[in-house]
Amino acid sequence: MTTRIGIIICGRYQGCGGGKCFRALRERRGAFAIYPPEEPVEIVGYSTCGGCPGGNVEYVPEEMKRNGADVIHLATGLVVGYPPCPSIRQFKSFIESAFGLPVVVGTHPIPQKYLDRHENLLFWQEQNMLELIQPLLDEAPEIKAAYN
Ligand code: SF4
């Protein structure tokens, strides 16, 4: 059965071409490692949060759902942009509650150079970010480096 995915990226990177996300989906890396390679996936929506404070999150998941989305991914850029998005948990709980769609935090692996910069940030410790993004962290260092 095909898993249909909607991706919401951080509005600060609205010009992003999506290269790392689409590559990671093809390679089943990062947060996409939860989908077995032999199982088909389809992107049914790709949008930004609309810019701080993320007003599009109130609307785009519904459109993605109408287009068949089974799951919403919040792009890795929300986690490793600086500053990290302060609303990741709110976005996740809102989308899950309002639209009944599960939310996965992350898309492509965390580039190693960003991980090196971010993992000591107080924000990450205060927000228990490590538990939220475990699948992104599980990638081998050489894979993270390949996404630098
Ligand atoms: S930091 Fe969060 S709310 Fe602001 S643009 Fe990025 S994803 Fe949207």
Image: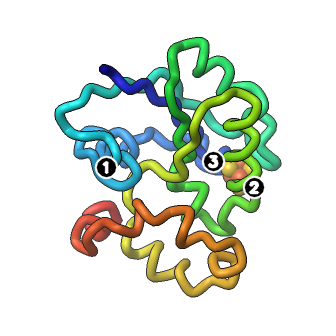
> What residue do we see at 63% from left, 37% from top?
48
Tally the numbered discs.
3
> What residue do we see at 43% from left, 40% from top?
18
**Are the residues flagged by discs 1 and 3 in contact, CB closer than 8 Å?**
no
Instruction: Residue 33: give its label.
Output: 1
Q: Which residue matches tag 3?
A: 10
> What residue do we see at 54% from left, 72% from top?
130
> What residue do we see at 82% from left, 48% from top?
53
Q: Where is residue 59, by image quadrant?
A: top right
Q: How is the image coloured?
A: rainbow
Q: Tell me the distance, in whole angstroms, between the alpha carbons under discs 3 and 2.
A: 11 Å
Which residue lies most toward the left here?
A: 38
Q: Earlier in the sequence, mark 2 or mark 1?
A: 1
Which residue lies most toward the top here?
A: 66
As helix, strand or loop, the secondary structure at mark 3 comes to: loop
Q: Which residue matches tag 2?
A: 87
Q: Percent from the top left, x then y, of residue 74?
A: 57, 46
Ligand 1 is within 8 Å of the C-beta of the residue at disc 2: yes
Q: Is residue 16 left or right of residue 136?
A: right
Ligand 1 is within 8 Å of the C-beta of the residue at disc 3: yes
Looking at the rendered image, the disc whose residue lies closer to the viewer, 3 or 2, is: 2
Q: Percent from the top left, x then y, of residue 147?
A: 32, 61
Q: Tell me the distance, in whole angstroms, between the alpha carbons under discs 1 and 3.
A: 21 Å
Q: Residues within 10 Å of mark 3 (few under 14, many from 20)?
A: many
Q: Residues within 10 Å of mark 1 (few under 14, many from 20)?
A: many
Q: Is residue 60 left or right of residue 23?
A: right
